[in-house]
Image (spheres, coloured by chain):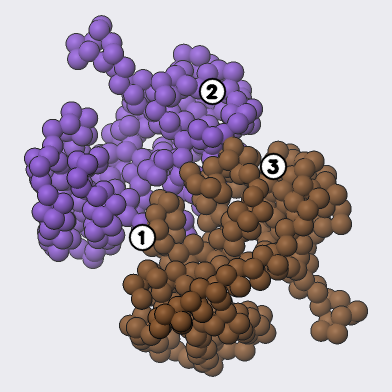
Chain colours: A purple, B brown
Amino acid sequence: MQRLNGKETAKQIRTELKDKVNLRKQMGQKTPHLAAVLIGNDGGSLSYVTAKVKACEEIGFESTLIRYEDSISEDALLDKVHELNDDETIDGFIVQLPLPEHINEIKVTDTISPNKDVDGFHPMNLGNMMLNLPGFLPATPAGIIELIRRYNIETSGKHCVIIGRSNIVGTPLSMMLSRNSNPGNCTVTLAHSRTKNLKEICLQADILIAAIGKPNFVSADMVKENAVIIDVGTTRVDDASRERGWRLVGDVNFNEVSPKASFITPVPGGVGPMTIASLMMNTLKAMELNGK
Amino acid sequence: MQRLNGKETAKQIRTELKDKVNLRKQMGQKTPHLAAVLIGNDGGSLSYVTAKVKACEEIGFESTLIRYEDSISEDALLDKVHELNDDETIDGFIVQLPLPEHINEIKVTDTISPNKDVDGFHPMNLGNMMLNLPGFLPATPAGIIELIRRYNIETSGKHCVIIGRSNIVGTPLSMMLSRNSNPGNCTVTLAHSRTKNLKEICLQADILIAAIGKPNFVSADMVKENAVIIDVGTTRVDDASRERGWRLVGDVNFNEVSPKASFITPVPGGVGPMTIASLMMNTLKAMELNGK
């Protein structure tokens, strides 16, 4: 069993990006600039955005954090999105989700220019992904693909079972792994809450990806010998032994499953760090695409 | 075994649309108007477009057929697309594919306004489909969904295996059947040319959909008892006994497979007529969406 070390891989990607940025600086070229809009004071959202800003700093990207109170109106937020779309110094930006209830998330996502949509959530980018055309890939699925690529895991002709059909992980990942690309060319089964015989289906998986947010859901009896296991789950579970009072738990029962796996991502330190690395790669790409 | 009679169902849909159009006429409202752009003299393309125009006439939709020689430049075609986008009398339009080699199909598709894209090929419409948001669904998959709906075939929790990952059938259909909708909520496996153990995978299918364009590819030993069989294939095969010299053959060996099936689409008269019915439904929807 080999661990898919997302933390180390993400670090490697940050180093590569840093080298690229330094080279650009030496040549007097622009450095990538990511803006992040954060609304309210949710602890999870704040820590995600902080990690993104920190990654920018480490790599040498410019970053701008824009914070609003929960009370901001939809119109005011949409005005800001238009301003960021038009701001030539900003290469890409994200509006951290979830948004307060009085703001229409779909409207906000659709208003972001597809050319600056480094989260890859815009329908135009998802449609282009489905057609295997250039565009921004959603950060978490793209991070998983990058991890698979860097560990030289063969995917062509493999049966990949994905548990969970979310818009940001399971569904786009099913597209990315089934297209004619490398990594890709998998036979993909997309399973979800309505799936019957889930165990039987999972047992067929050469590559099993769990993205449902149910701690320790995947047990050893659901896994084929030598399967590749990717765990996207990160649920906060109370843990009095930790100073902060909680720990992150994945969708896979790691202790039970890992002895059967050929490769497996730990939680934390697996998929999570790759998501931010993807966002950084998308930001550099945004700058290049916009011809700077 | 019950045949899924697409020909009859499409006729029923045309009657319903005709009634709606008549009601609109009585109320002095606009009737839907579909434009079709046809380039060159390919026999297949000409017969598809002719069938679409004929369907419009039967229902009482207005239709405009715009024909160009193969030699039309990309710029001239794009100008026409812009003109149709801006023409308020046109509710929806299609540019019949394939296009001559010197014209970039992706550029043409992307230039069509998503609000008039009644073929449902624009990335914006595909992305919205993935997100289960309003938009135009690609005509063939939408026709299959409509056929399943009208025959009250249960899909929730069923295992659906789709053979073929094309951009216009297999891939979008995999999304539509896996989303949380009715019909939908299937566990979907998308199989294709790189799939290993195809027979074993097909044998698990409660609903088996073949969309690869290989005559009689699906044999009885690949089909589970009582499966629902949807055959999207329509390959022209030489047939000296027919006056026109060919006949349409599906991807499924109908004679062999039909005794095992609970429902099965014939070829011709199954999925084919539903595609045009979908296009007509999309055209009415386009008019309604554009507030007329």
- Give the letter of the chain under mark 1: A
Q: Label 1, label 2: how many angstroms apart (C-alpha)?
A: 37 Å
Q: Label 3, label 1: how many angstroms apart (C-alpha)?
A: 32 Å
* Image location of residue B283, percent across then percent down: 48, 73
Q: Earlier in the sequence, mark 1 or mark 2?
A: 1
- Give the letter of the chain under mark 3: B
Q: Residue under label 3, please give it.
A: B205
Q: Residue under label 2, please give it.
A: A261
* Image location of residue A126, percent across then percent down: 39, 54
Q: Residue under label 1, please give it.
A: A124
* Image location of residue A201, percent across then percent down: 62, 31
Q: Amino acid at mark 3?
A: Ala
* Left or right: where B151 falls relative to A36: right
Instruction: For marks 3 and 2, give the one nearer the viewer.
Output: 3
Helix, strand or loop at mark 1: helix
Q: Residues within 10 Å of mark 2 (few under 14, many from 20)?
A: many
Q: Label 3, label 2: how many angstroms apart (C-alpha)?
A: 27 Å
Instruction: Answer above or below: position of A224 versus B264.
Output: above
